[in-house]
Image (tube, rainbow, N blue to C red):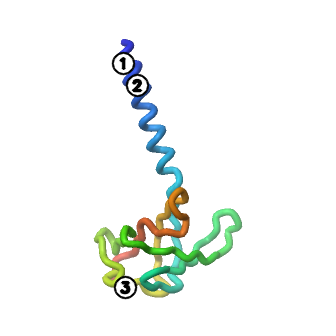
């Protein structure tokens, strides 16, 4: 019984640690204003003010870019002005650094 209690407490700690690590990732959904190899400018709605604001997201070698469900390079993504975009960042690392960029499949 004592071993079971230790196992249960350890499991609860692992779950709590995992949830707290993920809690700082935020996904912004918006529309592309412009994009180049270093920065993508996106218009998003501020959840507090409900007004549009422009956010500049940086890319690095670890930024994962998805067109639909397929991982692509920045060049292959061909990000266009006016298209919908979702950008995930981690405020503990760098709130302007894009970790994951999701784009719709081009028709």
Q: Is residue 49 left or right of residue 67?
A: right
Pointer 1 with pointer 3, Cβ within 8 A: no
Q: Residues within 10 Å of mark 1 (few under 14, many from 20)?
A: few
User: Which comes sooner in the sequence, label 2 or label 3?
Assistant: 2
Residue displayed at 42% across by 71% down: 101
Q: Which secondary structure, mark 3?
A: loop
Q: Which secondary structure, mark 2?
A: helix
Please tell me the numbered disc located at residue 4.
1
User: Which comes sooner in the sequence, label 1 or label 3?
Assistant: 1
Residue that sits furthest to the top in the current view: 1
The residue at which mark 2 appears reads as 8
Query: How many marks can you see?
Result: 3
Please tell me the numbered disc located at residue 79.
none
Residue displayed at 44% across by 74% down: 59
Q: Between 26 and 52, which is closer to the camera in this rendering?
A: 26
Q: Gap between marks 2 and 3, in whole Å?
A: 49 Å
The residue at which mark 3 appears reads as 78
Q: Gap between marks 1 and 3, in whole Å?
A: 54 Å
Q: Which secondary structure, mark 1?
A: helix
Q: Residues within 10 Å of mark 2 (few under 14, many from 20)?
A: few
Q: Is residue 44 left or right of residue 63?
A: right
State which quarter of the image contains the C terminus.
bottom left
Location of residue 39 in the rendering, given as x and y in whole percent from the top left corner? 49, 80
Residue displayed at 37% across by 72% down: 61
Pointer 1 with pointer 2, Cβ within 8 A: yes
């Amino acid at each position: 019984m004592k071993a079971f209690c230790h196992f249960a407490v350890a499991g609860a700690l692992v779950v709590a640690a995992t949830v707290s690590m993920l809690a700082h990732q935020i996904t912004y959904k918006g529309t592309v204003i412009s994009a180049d190899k270093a920065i993508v400018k996106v218009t998003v709605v501020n959840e507090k003010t409900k007004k549009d604001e422009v956010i500049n997201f940086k890319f690095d070698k670890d930024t994962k870019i998805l067109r639909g469900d397929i991982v692509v390079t920045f060049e292959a993504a061909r990000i266009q002005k006016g298209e919908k975009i979702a950008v995930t960042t981690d405020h503990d690392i760098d709130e302007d650094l894009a970790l994951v960029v999701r784009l719709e499949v081009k028709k």
